[in-house]
Image (spheres, rainbow, N blue to C red):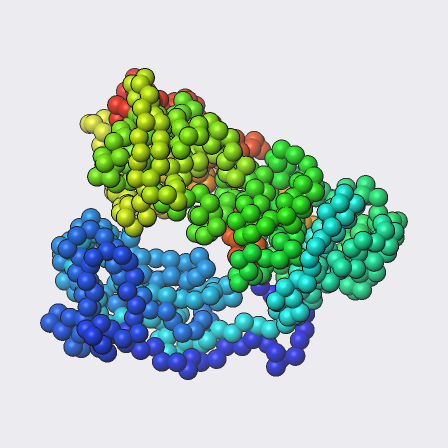
Amino acid sequence: MKNYFIIPLAFLGMTSFAQNRIENLNFESTENNFPKIWKIIGDSSAKVFADTKEKQEGTTSILIDAPEKGFKGLMYTLPQNYAGKKITLSGYIKTENVSNGFAGLWLRIDPEIGFDNMNKQGLKGTNDWKKYEVTLEMSPGKTDKIVFGALLTGKGKVWIDNLKITVDGKDIENAKIFEQKINKVNSDKEFDNGSKISNINLDKNNVENLKKLGLIWGYLKYYHPSVAEGNYNWDYEFFRIYPKIAGVSANQRDKILSDWIKNLGKFQIVKNSEPKDVKIKPDLEWITNSGFSQELMDQLLKLKDAKRPKVNYYVDFFSGVGNPDFKNENAYKNMSYPDEGFRLLSLYRYWNIIQYYFPYKNLIDEDWKGVLTEFIPKFLNAKDETEYTLASLEIIARIHDTHAGVWGNNKALTKYFGERYSPVKLTFAENKAVVNDFYNDDLGKESGLQKGDVITEINGESIDNIVKNRLKYTPASNYPTQLRNIASNLLNSNSETINIKFSRNGKEESKTIKTYTFPQLNYKKEAKDFFKMLDNNVAYVYMGSVDSKKLDETFNQIKNTKGLVIDFRSYPSDFVTIKMGRLLKPNLTEFVKFTNTDSSQPGLFTFTPTQKIPGEGKSSYQGKIAILINETTQSSAEYHTMAFRTAPNAKVFGSTTAGADGNVSDIKLPGNISTMISGIGVYYPDGKETQRIGIVPDVEVKPTVDGIKNNKDEVLEKAVEWIKN
């Protein structure tokens, strides 16, 4: 992120060489038979200890010995944040009889910047010493900490030795420490300990004042050049301006706001050319219809044509894609329950990000400005951390984007929806909550429930009523996807048991079933193979395990089959839109176009040129292609489906997808609430919408209660029937 203001060189953040030695990466220093400085992670019964008999070099290695299935590992936290582009962890691993999981090195950059644990390499069985490595892209300006180690999931033995960390190929001890730049934003410390705002009046007049202040504050943030350049801590400027307008008349308010804008500095006016291929225009009519004084209105209108810096301090754009990057927004992590001023700031921040940078704002079902008015009292009246988090979740749900939500193991929401888990997997079929699988087969049997059972009540409350009450807290692009998300925690609880009523074969029954902590649940998702033959004439690929390196080999095996089933009822494990898409068809085809905005006119979304996929000519796959989708088909899976269905012999089976396409952009709100939006607009070549609608199948097939009960995959069966006929 570039900074467009000038400050003395002495205050610039610079890099320096690391002073701290990174010790004991070869495990030679031990205490009580365990490597010094390292920590154990995981909750299995596996033993972790120093082994002097088996080592790759030196006198000691570390052994993780797991006689039964579980998870155990080692962790080391680097003492500094380092400047660089790539960080690599390498080391030697030996395994013995590893099964029901994998062994590996792991490397993570927090918060949620990068993670790799060698899961895709699938290291299992018995293997002699061999060097492995994992590499992550670095983002020093956004990094809190870097942690790494080794792990074993499943059972067996794994030895680890001679680890090494490098940054851009240089040993970590010679890497440069990254120091955050001190600029005009983060040097403003006045409100670090609180907004100094309390007891905000919520009568009708003041709520209207707060709405107008939120509109102007956000507009200046993205439209005023001086603010965009990073000359002000704009969060704290809100705390300074609000007390000045609280309780004053409309005329006095407008005069104070007008003087505020004047003091931000002069700016250059440019005439913007008439945009082409417009999808959404900026919503700025409020400037002229809010009843502002003539002076204030003229100032705001003049800003529309201000010459703004190419990069706004508060929002950049990811190279090559164009989705917004809000990396300079302060999450105020130490405020689990922010005060009134910070809660109002949270609302203003989120509302204005949607106002100017959400590519699907036109699909919100209501006047977004009315939502601002509605949520001012909801945020201010939130009495604790849970109510504040729920208010945030509720407004996030109002944009109807499946990529939205509150992410990152939010403790308040975990407690609200239930920290303990039932072993029962639910899905909605025929608008009923149906048992379709178990997270743990043994615990599932103990519950007494069976596949096909229809849950009708939980702790005395009907499923219909629970769903109705949860919809406002369930962000998703469409109703089937809301049901998908509700099903995932419907049987969560904070109690050790829950009482349910269910229907089996038309008979109503009641049961009390146990709940478990996540470690007790011992849920291990079984990996599925990418490719298999259903019979001699029909091939099947599961896109949740797709590997671009295996595509040529796979297509050589299936090239003479009558049909190919491509299952997108999962998230693709690799991005193979072009590489696999071209194998499916002979000719070049158009399949998608995008919209995005920029800092010159925030809120103006225009179409980019249509994207195309080449064909493979006569050597392309000639059989029928059946693509399977449902509400779990989301984002990259939807994008791939759009590409693959352009094949002349392709047909899509299933039900409407999650309706959330486009690269995501992270948003941080005060109190360290983490959410996202779909950051670019994704459309068919003719401009037809994909968001909220999702991918509409050619042949609609939905699972039935009877099909679930009898272990039938009705979507797959219909697709295979079409291929064979």
Q: How many marks?
A: 0
- Can I make out residue 268 in this image? no
Q: Position of residue 407 (x, y in %)?
A: 47, 49
Residue 277 on image: x %, y %: 65, 39
**Residue 322 higher or lower than 703, as above or below:** below
Relative to 568, does residue 506 appear above or below in the rendering?
Answer: above
Image quarter of residue 449: top left
Image quadrant occupied by the C terminus: top left
* Residue at position x 63%, y 48% in the image: 381
Residue 43 visible here: yes
Apparent side of residue 331 relative to residue 437 in the rendered image (left or right): right
Residue lying farthest left?
53
From the viewer's side, name the closer residue of 232 and 214. 214
Residue 712 vertical position relative to residue 246 in the rendered view, above or below: above
Residue drawn at point x = 50 percent, y = 38 percent: 474
Residue 597 coordinates in the image, percent (x, y): 63, 48
Which quadrant: the N terminus?
bottom right
- Drawn side of residue 385 relative to residue 241, left or right: left
In the image: residue 203, left or right of residue 447: right
Q: Position of residue 125 (x, y in %)?
A: 15, 53
Is 403 above or below relative to 267?
Answer: above
Identify the residue at horizontal 11%, vertical 72% (top origin). 53
Q: Residue at x 18, y 77 (%)?
A: 58
